[in-house]
Image (tube, rainbow, N blue to C red):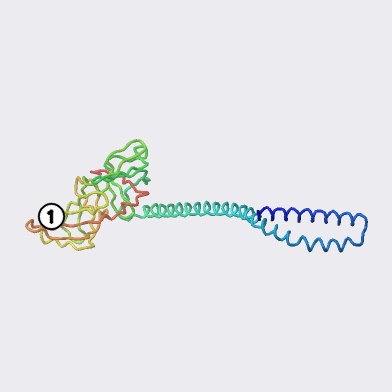
Amino acid sequence: MARAKRSRKTTITVVVLVLLSVTILTANAQGNSSATGVRGIVHDLTEPVVSSLQAVFRPVGNFFAGSVNYGRVADENAQLRYTLHRLQQQAVTNSLAEAQLKQVLALQHLSFLGSTPTVMARTIDVGRSNFTATITLDKGTTSGVLTGMPVVGSGGLVGRIISVSAHSATVRLVTDASSSVSVAFPSMTTEQAIVHGEGPDSDMSALYLPTGAKVTKGSLLLTSGLTGGVYPPGIPVGTVTSASSVAGAGGVDVTVMPAADLSNLGYVDVLQWTAGS
């Protein structure tokens, strides 16, 4: 009942306002000097109503304005995220290119190669399991790469070519469980050993060196170049990380860390050298 009464009052008020507005328009049309006074009265009467209507409809206007602004902000944020993603990708690409350039430059200054001709190749695949460690190169027989050729990186020996096609070759890394390398100790004129691979991500080992062999941590091991061997002499193979006597075996076991960074082989050199060369 009270709501109905308020509704009727509102309707009556609106009707009165309309009638007053018509009166003002008529007075203006007739040039009535009292129109100004009437307009003042109408303003006083309509001000509360107009203010109430503005209070009701202002949030609606703000809502639509806010919706438009939110859409614009969302678009700008999406654009910023896209730009940031592109910049991050470019940074990764630049970093990779810089690392590869360093490898290429380093391969051009390997003092241990002497005058041995080489073929630079790029790694296009990595093969790993618990015991095997191989990489595939983008060069093959058409580039002068043959089975049995040694492969080196900027730090030293990487491995040996075990299979080859016209345009690719597979390298068995020195850490592969089936790999073995005859090495010499530069600090000792007579001591030699065989370094065996222990699988990917593992150091190599040199087992059963003679008792009393003076092997110290940090010693550098080089390919021995034995007659009939599969590697030329003087290529760094790795450094000794530990040496311990074997109880009851009368020898010394040595752990060896590869000289080449086998986890980062973007580019390598294939030595055009074969056993008996």
Horizontal and vertical percent position of residue 165: 33, 36
Horizontal and vertical percent position of residue 159: 27, 47
Identify which residue is drawn at 31% across, 46% down.
271
Q: Is residue 81 left or right of residue 51?
A: left
Q: Which residue is tagged 1? A: 208
Q: Residue 135 occupies which quadrant of the picture?
A: top left
125 or 80, which lies in front? 80
Q: Residue 237 occupies which quadrant of the picture?
A: bottom left
Quarter of the picture containing the C terminus is top left
Identify which residue is drawn at 18% across, 57% down.
254
Q: Is residue 232 left or right of residue 78?
A: left
Q: Residue 261 occupies which quadrant of the picture?
A: bottom left
Horizontal and vertical percent position of residue 58: 67, 57
66 or 3, which lies in front? 3
Amino acid type, callout 1: Tyr
With respect to residue 143, does 48 lie above or below?
Answer: below
